[in-house]
Image: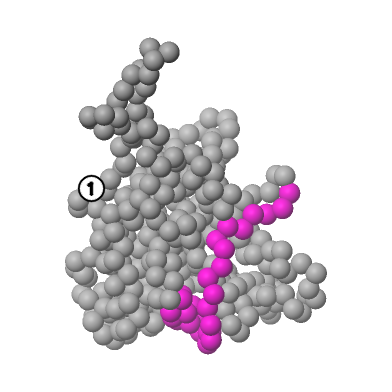
Amino acid sequence: MTLIKAKKQRSKPQAPTNYKLRCTNDFVFKSLMTYDPEIGKRLVKDLTESIRDYVVDKVDLTSTELLTEGFQAKDIRLDICARLTPDRLIDFEMQCGSNKMEIPNRSAYYAATLVNRPDNKGLAYTALTPVDQLFLLDFDFPAKADQPEKAIHVYQLAEILDHDILTNLISVVIIEMKKIIQMNHSYEELSRAEKWCWFLERYDEEHSDSVVVRLVEEDEIFKEADSVMKRMSSDPAMRDAAFEHNRRMMDMAQLRYEGKQEGLEEGIEKGIEKQRLETAREMLRNHCDDQLIQLCTKISLQQLEQLKKEIVPGFNQIEDDSEQSHLASD
């Protein structure tokens, strides 16, 4: 006789009761802009116009997975990528202190790859869609000796001595959110871009920051952003996914700090990919929408479908205490 036993369901990682969603977490930032797609488009439009002084007629959120061609090419997965009308591609990347990477080279690589995406292939050079690469930092960027308080830096290809702009096809914007907070402006002195930085850096569910309180009370856009954050905070699946993502990112940061052994970089990349898949699994178990899972974890459609095949409904034969446990005769 063979005893058939039910597989034990693995316990899900749960966020502590006091865990709070922070916009400086890249997972939460992405979710803020995608949890409610219609509100998200309005938020992206306002954020873009405040930082780049563009007049945006329309925003379409695009795929956040951009794979480069070639066997040894680096994969790119974006936080928030939007196509604007008039035609322009813009990408926002949230960078927290536990993920201090080589921002200058990384931003240039991302921007160049966006210009080289498939839908630009074969077009005349004058028809290429301009790209803005925007990095939101919650840590300090190397200060300029003559402008130590400068917090928003815009870079383009330019002549070294005369500073003539060669092309506006690529722009890289580095935004130091903490530095804006530290400058201690009064609320009335804050620019629109500075208000956004203040909200992203200081938001919490209790509205303990006086500037955030005024933003939410007096501005419709920030009122909408607050409503989305509150909905996300009350969503157990979203809280658990954000907590797990943050925990894994901290583990990866510790690995970067401690590891000096050969092959570390490859191990880090594999670890990051494993983290994305684990977060996606938890969201699937919590019945999250496919599109939201892809937007939040940056996994491909093929990876998502594979995860669905792995996660069998009911975790195979989950037995009742009464009749489902049984003995099968040989």
Range of magenta residues: 41-70
Q: Position of residue 33 (x, y in %)?
A: 42, 68
* Horizontal relation, residue 259 to residue 265: left or right: left
Q: Quadrant of the C terminus?
A: top left
Residue 105 at least partly seen: no
- Residue at the spot 51% in from the left edge and 42% down from the top edge: 309
Q: Which residue is mark 1?
A: 16
Q: Is residue 42 magenta?
A: yes
Which element carries disc 1, helix, strand or loop? loop
Give the mark count. Answer: 1
- Identity of the residue drawn at 54% across and 48% down: 305
From the viewer's perspective, is residue 322 above or below residue 164? above
- When asked about the image quadrant of residue 200, the answer is bottom left
Is 145 placed above or below 41 here? above
Q: Is residue 98 above or below residue 205?
A: above
Picture coordinates of residue 149 (x, y %)?
41, 72
